[in-house]
Amino acid sequence: MDRPELPLHHLHAFAVLAEELHFGHAAVRLGIAQPPLSQQIRRLEERVGHPLFHREPGRISLTAAGRELLPAAQRALAGVAAGLAAARDAGSGRTGRLRIGFAASLALTVLPGLLRAFLERFPEVRPDIREMTTAPQLAALHDGTIDVGLLREPHSGEAELGFATVLTEPFVAVLPSAHPLASLRSVPLARLADSPFVLLPRAAGPGLYDQITDLCAGAGFTPRIGRHAVEWLTVCALVEAGLGVSLAPASIRRVRLAGVAFRAITPGTARTRVAAAWCRDDPNPVVANFLATLP
Amino acid sequence: MDRPELPLHHLHAFAVLAEELHFGHAAVRLGIAQPPLSQQIRRLEERVGHPLFHREPGRISLTAAGRELLPAAQRALAGVAAGLAAARDAGSGRTGRLRIGFAASLALTVLPGLLRAFLERFPEVRPDIREMTTAPQLAALHDGTIDVGLLREPHSGEAELGFATVLTEPFVAVLPSAHPLASLRSVPLARLADSPFVLLPRAAGPGLYDQITDLCAGAGFTPRIGRHAVEWLTVCALVEAGLGVSLAPASIRRVRLAGVAFRAITPGTARTRVAAAWCRDDPNPVVANFLATLP
DNA sequence: TGGACTGATATCTCTGGGCGTATGGACCGT
DNA sequence: ACGGTCCATACGCCCAGAGATATCAGTCCA
């Protein structure tokens, strides 16, 4: 790739003149006087080494050399303009790709809303969503595999990551419909001490897990873990089967199973937090735009 | 088509830097010092409105905007270079098309040699040869339908056309083998006065026609025209059939018919001239090159 | 902690060339 | 013959920017 011999400027003048075939008109279109245009064309012809226009009295026309150069000039001009526009779009985050990791439980709650709000303002961005639990999300954010994560209770002090709370919700007790406590409108937490618990494995989301066990500890007992399940839907199924009870974020109410009851708990002050996470020094403008559309 | 916002110069620096991903090395490849390169990139980034490179300590990399701009820049650079080369080729006459009109009788004589010599030096030119008689050639030269003509005895004072003699040859008598004069090595012109002549119609080539009749007039007689034929081959066939005799350029000897004899004439001074003709003000460089390859 | 390597910044010089006005010269029409 | 049209030329102004050198600042490594 050699250094460019022809200034794009001259090629523009050339292209316009080739269209108008009239120095005066072309100069007007270029917003300059006619003599400068003559000069630019002359310079261009000097560099090419051959005349580009036949100057016959009364009208001018392209030479063979001009006919060869014209399409190249037009393509180059259009190409640069298009590239510039694309670069600006990409630079402003109007286009590009946004890889979002999200906890499965959020697919039915915050994710659709956030995604819709974002895509309304940036319809040209291609979102690339992938379900993953909390710990892998944090790892993926660090190694750049995802741009944004949606997770619960990040908790730990990740200095390189930023977090923005997207939703907070109370906990609810998940009970089999036949459970004695299901007849109450609100379940005192301590009364769950006797039932085995069905929870997600701690590795899937230590923050939430610890918060739940802390909750129980606050009520004076240590939950007895009966089963683990990797999805909230499975948790509900196991509860329905009578294998235990659970504590879960309120949005689990979305799961509608006949044999499962969701009840508020007392005290009802504890709330679980859903946050968007991103790499603080991520220069991707699409990420910045995503954060800007967060409520 | 808007005025170009990005100098091709900067795009070149950008493309090289995007390849090297190292300011120092890129600057060396560009043949400049490192600070000017930093400046050019900065200017470019200012115009784009977004950074094109991430400057992380130790290494730089393209931003999303840079990734969008790079292919456009490369295409534009390569396109302009290719267009420039094509324009130079066309301008120098190394490529292009050459439309050649030629008299049919020359297809077997001068045309192959001239064409071969030309194409040896300008193999990229596409020749476009078309058979036509003298008068149409002159018309075609004027209206730009052909670039070069190959014809006999243009004669008339065509101020706008240039002529370059390509071949001169004597006349020969064309006789039936059985003709009494065929036994002579050389035929005195005056002795043809008694035989009817077979000639090409005057309209096909007034120059040659008039030269032949002048030749006869010089020998003291006016040729009695028996037949016209539009091709020399037909002339020979008619002569063979005993319908008359003819006078023709010596290269007619190429026609080999058993019943036809070609004999030199006395006086043998008259010569017919084959010339290449072109439009004097034709700016087509291919034409100039063609003329330059003439012997 | 000091040196190597990276890129950024500051500052200067200098010139290419962009643009203007004024003018010349060729050709056209009336 | 004369004005009108069109392009080229001449000349001058002026600045963007290309290039250099010198220096600074951050990172990494020994």
Image: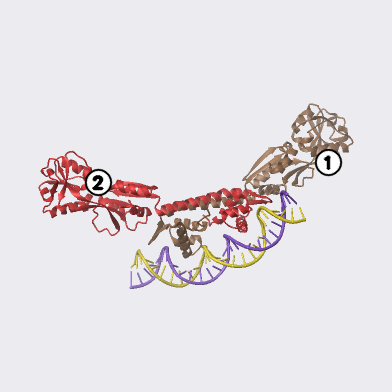
Chain colours: A brown, B red, C yellow, D purple
Residue B166 screen position, x and y as percent: 27, 52
Numbered disc 1: secondary structure? loop
Amino acid type at mark 2: Ser
Residues at marks 2 and 1 on the same chain: no
Choose mark 2 or mark 1, whichever is in front: 2
Amino acid type at mark 1: Ala
Quadrant in the rendering for residue A184 = top right
The residue identified by callout 2 is B105
Residue A202 screen position, x and y as percent: 79, 35
Nearer the observer, A156 or C7: C7
Say whether residue B254 is left or right of residue B72.
Answer: left
Residue B258 screen position, x and y as percent: 18, 38
How many numbered callouts? 2
Residue A141 screen position, x and y as percent: 71, 43
Nearer the observer, B9 or B46: B9
The residue identified by callout 1 is A270
Outermost residue toward the right in this view: A220
Bin the neighbour count of mark 2 within 10 Å (Cα to Cα): few under 14, some 14-19, many 20 and up: many
